[in-house]
Each structure stands twice: as C-alpha cells, then as structure tokens.
Image: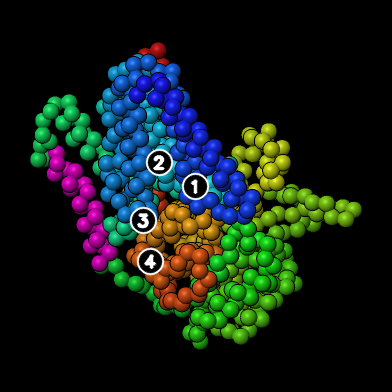
Amino acid sequence: MSKQIRIGVIILAVLVAAYMGMDMWELYQNEQLWGYRPVILFIAIWKAIQLSLTLRWKEMMPRWRWLTMSTVSGILLALSFPPFSTTFLIFLAWVPLLLVEHEASGTKNSGRKVMFFAYNTFVIWNILATYWVGNTAFVAGVFAMFLNAFFMSVPFWLFHKTKQIMPRLGYTGFVVYWISFELLHLTWEISWPWITLGNAFSQFPSWVQWYEYTGVFGGSLWALLANLLVFFLVRNFLEKKEKPAVLEIGKVVGLLVIPIAVGLFMYSAQTQKGPKAEVVIVQPNFEPHHEKFTIPDRTQLKRFVALADTAITPKTKYVLFPETSFGLVEISDFDKNGEIRFLKSFLEKHPQVTLITGVDSYKQFAESDPDTRHTRTVKRGSGTMRYELYNGAIQMRAGNYEEDHYKKSRFVPGPEIFPYRDILFFVKPVVDYLGGSVMGLGSQPQRSVFEMDGMKIAPSICYESIYGSYNTGYIKKGAQATFIMTNDGWWDNTAGHRQHLQFATLRSIETRRDIARSANTGISAFINQRGDILQPTKYDEAVAIRGDIQLNDEITFYVIWGDMIARLSFFTALLLVGNLFVKWRVKR
C-alpha cells in the first residue's frame, strides 16, 4: 500500500469517526441510545492510529503481511465469543499472531514489532467483543478496550523475550504468561476478566462440563495448547513444504475431540440434585440511561408487584427482583422506608413468599464512627453528614422485621470503583468536574448467603457473576442455589447482555448450582445445574416468569480447590521471569 493510499484511508477513517461521533452526540442530546455505533467509531479511530504509525516505517512489504495476519487473529478471537456460535475458531485464532512473532524473531527491534502487532490483535479483539461498554460510559469504554489491549500485549511480549533468551521454554512461557495475566485480571483493581479465553465456551456449555474440576482456566489452557499444536503444524508446513504427519494431525484431533467427548458424556450423565423450590423472576424493563432513575421508586415498584402477582402461586417460595430496584435506603432504618413498607404490604398477601431484591443503600456514620476508605461527606444544614454508599441486596418476608443485607463487593472499574486512587490522586479534579466520585462503593470482606426456612441462597449482583473463584465463596457458606440480580440495559440491545447471560452458565457448572437470573431488562432466565438456559425472556419486555430450582448441597472439586491451573501457571511464570531476568543480565 503506497503512502498516498495510506493517507487517503487515514483521512477516510477520521471522517467516519467524526461523523459517528457527531451522530452519537446528537442521539445523546435527544436521549436516544447508541446501539452498535460505538463499534464503528472505535474501529475507525484505531484504523487512523494504526495507519498513521506505519507512515514512519520503511520496507513495508513484510509488515503489511504481518498487519493483516495480526488483524485476522483479532477477528477470529472476537468471533470465538458469544453471541457468535463459531466457538471452534478459538482453537486456531492465535495461529496468525504466533506466525507473526515467529517471523519477526529474526529481525531488528523484534520486541517492538511483536508488541505493536500483538497490540493490533488485542485492540481489534477488545473492540469487536466489548464495544458495547461504550454505551454505558464512553470514557470507561475507551479505557476498557485500548488500555486492556496494552495489558494483553505485555504477556505476549514476555513470551517473545523468553523464546529469544530461553528457546526451549518459550512456548511454555506463552501458556503460563497468558493464564497468569488472566488470573491477575481477576484480582487487581483494574479487573476486566470479561474475555478470559475460557469464557468463550459458554456458548456451548455441554463441551465443558469438566469445569466443575478446572473452572474457566481449564478452557483457557485447552485453547492455548490447541493453538500451539495447530501453529506447529502450519509453521512446519510453511518452512519445510511437507504435509503434516498423521501422528501430528492425530495429536491436534485428539486434543480437540477428547475434551468435548468427555464434556458431552458428563452432560448426558448429569442429573438435577436437591429438593425443589418454586421461584418467580421479575423483569420490569425500565431503560436505565434516561428512564429508570427519573421515574419515582413507588411507580416502578407498582409494576414490579403487578408483574409478580401474575406469576405467584401458593407454591411459590421466592420472588426475585433485579439489581438497584429502588433506593436510597439507610441500612439501619429499613422499616422506616416507604418503599420497604410498600413491599411488606405486598408480601403480607403472600405470606409464604420470600422476596430477594437489589437495592441502593447507604450507612450514615455517627460522629464517633471513624472514616472508611469510601466515606463521603455532604453538607446538611449547618453541619455535615458522613456516609457510605452500597450496591446491595436484601431479603424480605412478611412478619420478618429484620432484613438481611448483602453488599456487592466486586466492582466495575470506573462506574463503581476508581482503581488505585492513591496513586492516581491527580485525576480526582477531573472526576469531580465530570460529576463522578473517586470514593467508590462500600463492600463486605467475605461472601454471605440469605437463609430462610433452611434454604440458603447466594445473592450475586451483576459483575460478581463473572468471577468463578469469587462465587465459590457463597457455596462455602452453604449456598444451595444462586440468584443473580443485574441491570443489563446499560449496554442497549447489543452483545453485552447476551454474553453476560452465557457466562452465568459456567458458574452453574463450576458449582453445580441452579441459577435464577433477574435482569432489569433482557435477559432473565433460569439456568440448571448443567448450564442449560431455561425460559429466557426477550430484551425490552416487562414480564415475570415462574420455574422450579433445585437446592443442591453437594460440593464440587472446583469449589474446594479453586483455580489451581491459574495458580500453578502463575508460580511457573514467576520462575520463568526470574530466570529470564538473570540470563538477560548475564548476557548484558
């Protein structure tokens, strides 16, 4: 591609980005949603940046080939994830990028080249798979895609350096560095484990019934090993011009077929366990950007109650409402709140029913109470009020005057937590100017469960349902089923809410617990102990559904041992990095 053509494409990309940005701004001003527009905007922005960087390069021919190959890897990785049914692409999606790394290894400044082409792959993957984050908070969406792509590039660059200095351990480094990165993404404050490789198989949960032993990192390991075997076949064919040996092909086929066969066998043998309980799930369908937080809580709750009344029977044990159904409620005075009293009057008509609902709540501190990390201060009359905010859930029942309260503790970076605010303190004025807060939400140190009549329920709120090992904390506290409360309408009718639902199937397999999932809008559903999605609702409909869950007490291997694959990978990665550093120093 000549310099003139590149400049033309850059100008076109800038014009597309500018047009899309103005269109999105106009929609925002008219209180309309963006739908799929962010994906066009982000792709146009990246294409302009990408080609602008290439203008300074010389001898472009081999690099254009690498740019194409790394782009193909990004597209294949995105197509491996829900809502696409092309999950099998995950077994070869890394191959073009691995070929780029292999060919670049013998060139000057190979580390810089590998970093750039890896970044290209991961930007495209992030944009195509998670563009919808921009519908929630545009700035947070930009960071989620472009910063996350940089984080992803680091383990791939480390793999390249390990392969240069310790060739025999290079591809071991590829596997353990990547899984270690995925583990890190589950634990640090900039946590964004949405496109963990093992999540790709949520589109076909019958393939990965063995997640009850390995968790999602078993799927990540499977995908990485399969890509390496396919890469070795392709590399040898390209270099030696020989057809792959039957044994080599057999290894690839075996690695692909055997885990699927085991999963399908376990799927057919898996049976529902535990006594039944009838549950009603309410999907009220209030659009969150411009509707939900402007309509009075009582008006919304009347719809909640009316929908629930259409589905409740004398056998109903639980009614489930979605995340942030109403609020703000002071946690020490629940029964003084008008909405709580309204719901109590509804429950008095159904004395056998226990209500679990999401709620925005806060705790007001007394003068003698010390500040916490999340304490906020507001003027109140001639003085000030100190308080802490929570995204929580409560359990209510007629005649029960003490509500159980659970505080969400896994937060979305940006909207719910400002990562590493002590280090990034200089950003606080900008956040305050934009109307946000660096204080974040209060949490609780351990998981807790809601118990009623001997039944124990795990209250998982929105983002918390993405974390496998986190959810085992509920099961260790005795949870027999999981209730997920979420508000997926922030993402509009795009891939985000479908992915969120599919990922929940993996939690049911890991813990062998039934799931009842209530979304403010699309998709609410029941999920059984082998990951089947039952009675899924449509997006943008107000509805209540009724079904049976089974309360299982058995504990899976994964609940006991957690992410062993990730921990072993992290330990191995530390050894490799330490050895790499020593050898690099000696070589210098």
Residue 236 location in percent, x, y? 17, 30
Disc 2 versus disc 4: nearer the observer:
2
Mark toward the start of the polypeptide (1 vs 2): 1
Mark toward the start of the polypeptide (3 vs 2): 2
Report the residue that reaches farthest toward the right.
382
Disc 3 versus disc 2: nearer the observer:
2
- Mark 3 closeness class: few <14, some 14–19, many ≥20 residues within 10 Å: many
Q: Which mark is residue 37?
A: 1
Cα–Cα gap, marks 4 and 1: 29 Å
Magenta span: helix, strand or loop, mainly?
A: helix
Mark toward the start of the polypeptide (1 vs 3): 1
Residue in the picture at 63% in, 72% down: 301
Residue in the picture at 20% in, 34% down: 234
Q: Nearer the viewer, residue 5 or 500?
A: 5
Q: Nearer the viewer, residue 488 or 290?
A: 290
Q: Nearer the viewer, residue 156 or 567?
A: 156
**Range covered by the magenta-colored residues:** 248-268
Task: Identify the amino acid type marked 4.
Answer: Ile
Whether the magenta-drawn stretch holds residue 258 is answered as yes
Cα–Cα gap, marks 2 and 4: 26 Å
Quadrant placement of the C terminus: top left
Q: Quadrant of residue 368?
A: bottom right
Q: Which mark is residue 202?
A: 3
Q: Quadrant of residue 576?
A: top left
Label 4: which residue?
Answer: 533
Task: Identify the amino acid type marked 2.
Answer: Trp
Mark 4 in CB contact with mark 1 (< 8 angstroms):
no
Q: Secondary structure at mark 4?
A: strand
Mark toward the start of the polypeptide (4 vs 1): 1
Residue in the picture at 36% in, 72% down: 273
Residue 549 location in percent, x, y? 42, 74
Q: Which mark is residue 125?
A: 2
